[in-house]
Structures are given as C-alpha cells and as structure tokens.
Amino acid sequence: MLGPLTGGGDVDVNRQVSGLSARVPRPVDYVVVGGGLIGLLTARELRLAGQGVALIERGDIGREASWAGGGILSPLYPWRYPDSVSALAAWSQRAYPALCATLAAETGIDPEWTQSGLLVLDAAEIVPATAWTRRHDVTLRQCNAATLRNLEPALGTAAADVMLLPDIAQVRNPRLLKALVTSLLQLGVTVETGVDVARVTMHAGRVTGVDTSHGHRPAVNVVIAGGAWSSALIQPLGTLLPVEPVRGQMLLLRGRPGAISHIILAGEQYLIPRRDGRILVGSTLEYVGYDRSTTDEAREALHRFALSCVPELARCPIEAHWAGLRPGSPDGVPFIGAVAQTAGLFINTGHFRNGVVTGPASARLLADIALQRRSAIDPASYAIKPRKISA
C-alpha cells in the first residue's frame, strides 16, 4: 500500500481536498473522470477556457501512475518511440518551465522543475540517438571516460562513449500533483475523491453524465482520463479500448544533496536525484494485471542497480518501495480525442511510461479537440480507433 512518502518523500496531496468535495448541483460542461496528472491537466485546460468542470477520482488524487513515476521530462529512449510521442513530448518540454512557475506563483507549491540533464550509459544507442537528435534539433554530447568522471565523480562505472542530453529536465511529480489540485480548487473546479464511476450515461446517442457510487453527476460532456482503468468505462458502450495496466516498481533512497547531479539511465533502469538528496531508483516493467503489490525480487534488483552505478549509495537507507500501474497502449501512443458515434464523450489515456512528459500537450490537445479549436499538434495520430464489440 502506498505510504505518505511514496513518490519522493512528499506530503500526501489528498489532505488538501479532504472534506472539500461537493455534489454537482446541475449539469456542468465537463466531467473529467480520473484524478491523475492527465485528468488534472485536462480539467485545468478546460477550466482556463471558461468551461464549468468537475473532476471525479475513484481513489485519492494522483495516487496511481502519476504518483508512482519518476518525473523525467523525456521518454527514456525517445528515439525508440513514434514521432507522435516525440511531438507531445517536445511541446510539453517547452511548456513545463512556465507551467511550473505559474503553479508555484498561484499556489505556493514548487513542482521543482530542474534541468538535470540525462546521462545514457549505453554506447549501443549512440547511432540511433545521434540520428534522432539531429532530426529533432535536440542537443546531444558524446562523453569519454574522463568527461564522465568530471560530470559524475561518484559513478562506479568507467564506461566510455556515453551520451549526455543536457537539456532534459525533471519535475517532482507529487509536488506537481499537489500544485495542480490546489490550482483547480482555486479556479472553482469541483473535485471529488473516493467516488467510483460506475458508468457513463447516455440518451439519444449523447452523454448525459456519469453514475457514481455517490449518485448521478450530470454533464454535457465527459472526459475519460482514468489511466489503466479507462477501458472498463468504455467497454459497456460497445467499444474495446486496448489499454492495459503495466506495473512499475520503484525505490526511494535517502541520499545526500549532490551525490549525483544528472539523471542516469542504463538499460531500462535509472536514477533520479532530487534537490533534497533523495534518489529515485526505477523501474520494473511487469504485465501482472491490476496487482499493485511489491516484490522482494524487484526491490533487490533495483537496489543492486543503484549500487552498481553509484557505490556510495550503499550508505543510503531505502526510504520507500512502491508500485504503480501505468496505462499501457500497443505502441506507446496515447488515445486522445472524441469517441465516434458517442457525442460528448472524449478519451485521454494510454500514455504508458510517458504520462508526465506528454501530459501538458495531451491536455491541450484534448481541450482543442473538445472545444473545436485549431491545435498546434496534429490530432490524427491519437484518434480513437478502438475495436467494436461483436454483437
């Protein structure tokens, strides 16, 4: 079970919404189902556009994939992803500094946007990475062993021909979630937690709201941003959405500030240094259904990885070990847009491992589609093409 320190030693974001939820007295313009990062950002975009918005979360705000992730503002190996993911990531990367500064000014909560840079300790990736960074105008520097020692003296590897992407940043995702929900409340968005959405209600081919464990919530439009749980709300309407849970386990070490200064990536695992010295170690990739339990095997493997990279971390206690469920999609491209033949129903889910880095762009694109605005991102690649259920 996730404890209060899960995700980087931050205070539980849900304390601020406890007791603040209220019933929606009349139809709102939009009900957003899902209180993770995608749902919060989508609700904020719609509200800033002048829409009446209510957000409903089945558990606690942001306590699934959004809370459990690391907050790296880049796909781990961006050259492995389709251009459609790169487009969302690039837009969001440009937007994040201003978004975090605005949230900090509005709420007094700093999401800790930090340009750490990303060190990739894998020489085999240099050729595809070089081609991709040239095509996308992204800065990449190759580093020899001497340069690597200067960049990260505590590294226990003498790897040569590693790569540095110096512009890659991170956010402290629990603080980002806390700032976002505070912003929504200040903007007048109704936020309900601990409320299960049983079904999307329809009349004459158009949504009319959602039925919940606390009664009906009427709405002109509904946005499903429920992460790995989104498919269950779409299926009763006759559509199969190929989004499934993918478990990721992580560790949190209590280190000293400055022990490492870059995000370090090797294979599928990584270290993320926070400003206060804590270090996140991630992550596993497990197809085990909706099982959020942690395992001793993963704990030991992640700890071994951390110590193999930075031996001095052996002196750092393990502060937390947790798991979260990512919303996996077939090729990592999220589903963003309207559901065909269901007026007023929209989807924003399936971001897999890249919900944080693609979140702002995904929310803006969904709002552009729903409000029929011209978008800077071509929506075609993210269109809902789910499979119909046979009669």
Image (spheres, rainbow, N blue to C red):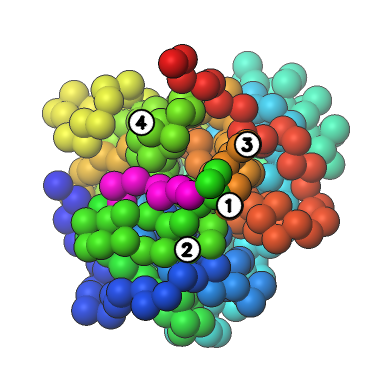
- Helix, strand or loop at mark 2: strand
Q: Which mark is residue 219?
A: 2
Q: Is residue 334 left or right of residue 382?
A: left
Taking depth in this image into account, of 209 and 123 the one nearest to the observer is 209
Dot in front, 4 or 2: 2
* Distance from Cα at disc 3 to Cα at disc 1: 10 Å
Amino acid marked by disc 1: Gly
Whichever of callouts 4 and 3 sits on the residue coming sooner in the sequence is 4
Residue 354 position (above or below residue 36): above
How many marks the image carries: the answer is 4
According to the picture, the residue beneath numbered tag 1 turns out to be 344
Dot 2 or dot 1, earlier in sequence? 2
The percent position of residue 174, horizontal first and vertical second, equals 37, 61
Disc 1 packing (10 Å; few <14; some 14–19; many ≥20): many
**Residue at (79% x, 42% y) in the render:** 378
The vertical placement of 150 against 188, above or below, is above
